[in-house]
Structure formats: C-alpha cells, structure tokens
Image: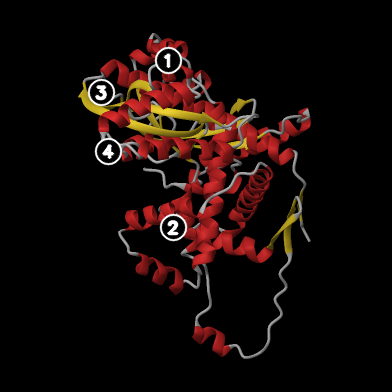
Amino acid sequence: MKKISLIFMAFISICYADTKSENESSVNTQPTVNLNKIAAYVNKRIITQNELNQQIQQTLYNLKQQGIQNTQTADLSKNVLDQMIVQQVQLDMANRSGIKTTDAEINSTIANIEKNQNISDAQMMNKLSSQGVTMNQFRQQISDQITLEKLKQREVDGRVFVNDDEVTRVINSEAYKKRVDYNLSNILITIPEQATQAIVQQKSDIANSIIQQLSQGQKFEQLAIKYSNGQNALSGGEIGWKSNTSLPPQVLDQLRSLPIGGTTGAIKFPIGFMIFKVNGIKQHGTPQIVKQYHVRHILIKVNELTSDDEAERKIDGLYNKLAKDKNDKAAESAEFTELSKQYSDDPGSAIKGGDIGWTSKGDTVPQFEQTILATPVGEISKPFRSPFGWHILQVMETRDSNMANEKERTDIRQELRETKAQVLYTEWIRNIKDTAYIKINND
C-alpha cells in the first residue's frame, strides 16, 4: 500500500473539519456554554479539549479512508494527544532554530495537492468552504507540515549515513543470496531512556498483553492504534516493504517462519518492545533497466559561519549570474564551471566544475532527487534547499542503463538509510519530549 504523505494527510484532515449546518444551528435557539477545557500544557502553549476532539474526528475519518473500520474514540485519545504534543514540541524547536516556511513553498504544495486530486483552485476553495474551513486555516496546517519536514531533515535525515562497506557486507551475506521482501506493520512500546527495571517490566507486560489479545483474534491495526507509541500508530502501524537484508537478525529469526497475516512475539530493542505483522511476502524481483541522470551542481552550505538567509542570498546571486547567459548555452556552461570551482562548498565536485556524475533514483536526498526529476535536460534549476544547504543544479544528459548490480546496491543503501532513520527518529522524538515541559490535564 502506497504511503500517503504527511502533507496530503493534512489535506484530508482539514477537509474533514466538523462544522454545524445552518439548519442545526437554527434549531438550538438557547445559548450554550462551551467549556473548552485544557487537555495538555506544552512548553508555553496549551492544547484544548476541543482541539483534541476535532483531531480525533479527523483521525477517525483518515482511518476509514485507509480501510480501518470500527475504531473506538477512547482507543484514539491517548495517541492523538501524544502526536499533537510531539508536533507542538517540534514546532517550538523549529521556531527557536529559525526554520521558516515561505509563501512560495506553501503555494507550491497546494498546487501539487490540486494536481494530485485533479481539481482547480476554484474547486479547492469550494471544497474547503463546504467544510467550513478557511484558506488561512488550510495554509497554516500546510505551513506546519512543511516546517516539521524541514526540522526532521536537519535533525534526523541529515545525520543518517550509509557507507560502501555496509552495502558490500549486505551483498556478500547469505541473507542477500536468499532475498525476501516483507510488507510489515509494527507496534512499538517505547522504554524511557533512564527506565528502572520496574518500568521495563511494566512495558514488557503491555507488550505481552498485546500478544495475548492478538492470539484471541483482536485486529493488529486496532491494537496499534490503541497501544503503539510509534509515529505510524494512527495508520495501523504500517511501515511498508522491507528487505530481509536491512532487517535486524532478531526480527528475521521470527519472520522466516511466519505466513502472511502472522505476527511475531515481543522483540526487545534499546528503544522499546516491537511486535511485527506480515502483510505480504515476495521474492526479490529481477532488477530492471533504470534511468540515470548526469548532474552537476553548486552547493552553498549552511553552518556556523553562514546562516540560512546568507546562503540563500549567495545562491540566488549565482543563479542570477547564470541567467544572464541563458540564451547562450556555451557561455552558460562555461560560467557554471567557473562559479562551481570558485564558490561551491562541495569540494569533491567543485574541482570538476560541479560534476557529480551519473545518479539514479534513491541515490540522493529527496529534495535533490525531486529537483533532478523536475529539471529538463540542459536547463539549470532554481535555487532549492536540502539538509546540506542551498543548491542549483543542471541535468546535462540522461540514459537508460542495465544497472543490475548498481541498482541492487542503491536499493540496499536506501533500505539501510530508512532503517537507521526510523531508529534515530524514534530516539530523537523521545529526547525532545524529555527536554520539553509537558503536563497532561487529567481533570
């Protein structure tokens, strides 16, 4: 099942904003008292009960869209509130770090949503209006999601590295010779970083209780929604396809004997107990012909000496210099080479005029890959941001290649990245929650 992006889920959620009809409001002529209690304190902000209730209703709608039916509101409350708290902690962190989202980024995201939904601006406005949602509210939610993605890229994605030795070890392993792909869901019961033995036992008891409920016929997705502390909990725990080459041995040991629909026992990791469900199994397919892109770029890094705004201004200046030669490709090419050698902060490619060679899908970070795919051959992209800083790039040529071995190495590298990022992200969320002021109001 293809995962829906955070931003698209935000679109679904906000379009489900619950509003009273005119007929309903006209029937109730008596004044009502709306006691909007505080559900939680997060740093200097609050989450109200009304906000929590609305988010629960939106989540119920999203789950129905994914085919997960009959979810109880009581099962959702804790996880929905926890995710709202985590989001607020991250937004506060992003604000302190000076991470901003521009109107251009919001406009581009909305345009992509409209394109994916095959609707016009007017149809989008009508859809929002019919649900009582203003465009300002919609734009704010999109802005928050983009900000969270930027923060994650900086704090997590930018810190995940997979070296060639790791990939080679996988290729030479016995597991790789008998490759199997598993479509998985999981339930995570996290253990606090400084947990006592009593707390660890408590978490173990919860995990074992879930195992027992599964054996009694309870649905895995519903138990994930009710108990899991993972960021994928509210999608029923789905994590998608994973190769046996990227999964930890203690997980593989249990997966090997499971049929589709089977579940593992509670597997202990440093971050907590995990339970996996097998949604699908397939043998590793034969690698296909892949499209490659010959790319060069100029990078201005963001660091202690160069702020984000300074790096953006610098890359804009270089882009404008190149734009002057847009109608003279030879002059533009020569200028790109010189500017890269003089200004690019990527020493490996700068010495070669910015040339990073041939790349395939999955070789680079998402922002870089998306820009490659959107840039016509011979054209220079507009400035864009990645976890490494600000770039402009040029796609010099493309080719279709039988890259069986290279394609396999790329797939392995990407799966290892995703596995590392998932663990790092879970640890990061646990740490930033520990450093925030959070108080749940149980009154």
Q: Which residue is mark 1?
A: 167
* Residue type beneath disc 4: Pro
The residue to which callout 4 is attached is 376
Above or below, 174 against 281 in this view is above
Element under disc 2:
helix
| Residues at discs 4 and 1 in contact (Cβ within 8 Å) | no
Mark found first going from the N terminus, 2 or 3: 2
Instruction: Return the disc, 1 or 3, that comes first in the chain's sequence.
Output: 1
Residue at 78%, 29% in the rendered image = 196
The C terminus sits in image quarter: bottom right
Rendering coords of residue 38 (x, y %): 74, 62
Question: In this view of the protein, which residue sits in the foreground, 279 or 147?
Answer: 147
Instruction: Give the image quarter of residue 228.
Output: top right
408 above or below 189?
above
Q: Which mark is residue 64?
A: 2
Pointer 1 local density, CA inside 10 Å: few below 14, some 14–19, many at least 20: many
Q: CA distance from mark 1 to mark 3?
A: 17 Å
In front here: 145 or 323?
A: 323
Q: Are marks 2 and 3 in contact (CB under 8 Å)?
A: no
Report how many numbered discs are placed on residues in the image. Answer: 4
Mark found first going from the N terminus, 4 or 1: 1
Q: Amino acid at mark 2?
A: Lys
Secondary structure beneath label 4: loop
The answer to whether residue 347 is above or below residue 273 is: above
Looking at the image, do the residues carrying marks 4 and 3 touch, with CB atoms under 8 Å apart?
A: no
Q: Within 10 Å of the Cα at label 3, are there few (<14), some (14-19), or many (20+) other Cα atoms?
A: few
Between the C-alphas of marks 1 and 2, the distance is 39 Å
Q: Position of residue 383 (x, y in %)?
A: 43, 39
First of labels 4, 3 by sequence position: 3
